[in-house]
């Protein structure tokens, strides 16, 4: 039986082009931030928006694809996981803990020259999709 722990999906827009670095092992890493806006209607029937920011990390093939993305690019992250990382800051030696989204698969939603998304721009789900139905 397959377990679906720590699976994450989100769609949003890149805040800036991803930056890159290479680990000592030779693995390419790209980092960026994704903005997603939750919309809701409050008690006074006013439409409100609350932005959420997600730090993203891409490794190897997804990193090469992410480095081709520009600021404001619409991404649909279809397969990712959230990880906690602890480190000590170089400036003052304090311990920090951050949460980041490790992206395994994502799709870029293309736009028409006028700015609206193109019809059928999203990439179809893989044929061997093994996600359970109704979960």
Image (cartoon, helix red, strand yellow):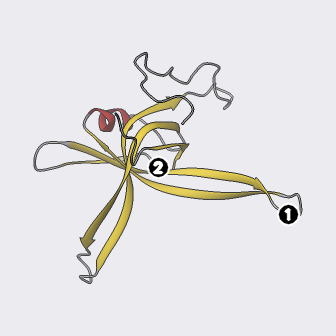
Q: Is residue 67 left or right of residue 73?
A: left
Q: Residues within 10 Å of mark 2 (few under 14, many from 20)?
A: some
Tell me which residue sits at (63%, 52%) in the image: 37
**Cβ atoms at labels 1 and 2 below 8 Å apart:** no
Q: Camera-side residue: 84 or 24? A: 84
Residue furthest out toward the right? 44
Residue 13: image location, x then y, percent = 55, 44
Q: Which mark is residue 43?
A: 1
Q: How far across and down, in percent of the image, does residue 105 sit?
A: 39, 34
Task: Return the disc, 1 or 2, that comes first in the chain's sequence.
Answer: 2
Q: Which mark is residue 16?
A: 2
Q: Residue at x 35, y 32 (%)?
A: 65
Can you tell which mark lies on residue 113? none
Query: SS class of the residue under badge 2?
Result: loop
Which of labels 1 and 2 is toward the front? 1
Where disc 1 sits, the SS reads loop
Quarter of the image for residue 64 reads top left
Q: Is residue 30 left or right of residue 130?
A: left
């Amino acid at each position: 039986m397959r377990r679906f722990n720590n699976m994450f999906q989100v769609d949003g827009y890149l805040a800036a082009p991803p930056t890159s670095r290479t680990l000592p092992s030779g693995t390419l890493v790209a980092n960026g931030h994704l903005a997603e806006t939750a919309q809701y209607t409050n008690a006074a029937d006013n439409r409100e928006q609350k932005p959420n920011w997600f730090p993203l990390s891409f490794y190897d093939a997804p990193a090469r694809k992410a480095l081709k993305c520009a600021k404001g690019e619409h991404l649909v992250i279809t397969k990712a996981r959230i990880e906690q990382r602890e480190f000590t800051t170089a400036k003052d030696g304090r311990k920090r803990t951050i949460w980041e989204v490790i992206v395994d698969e994502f799709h870029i939603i293309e736009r028409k020259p006028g700015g609206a998304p193109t019809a059928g721009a999203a990439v179809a789900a893989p044929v061997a999709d093994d996600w359970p139905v109704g979960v």
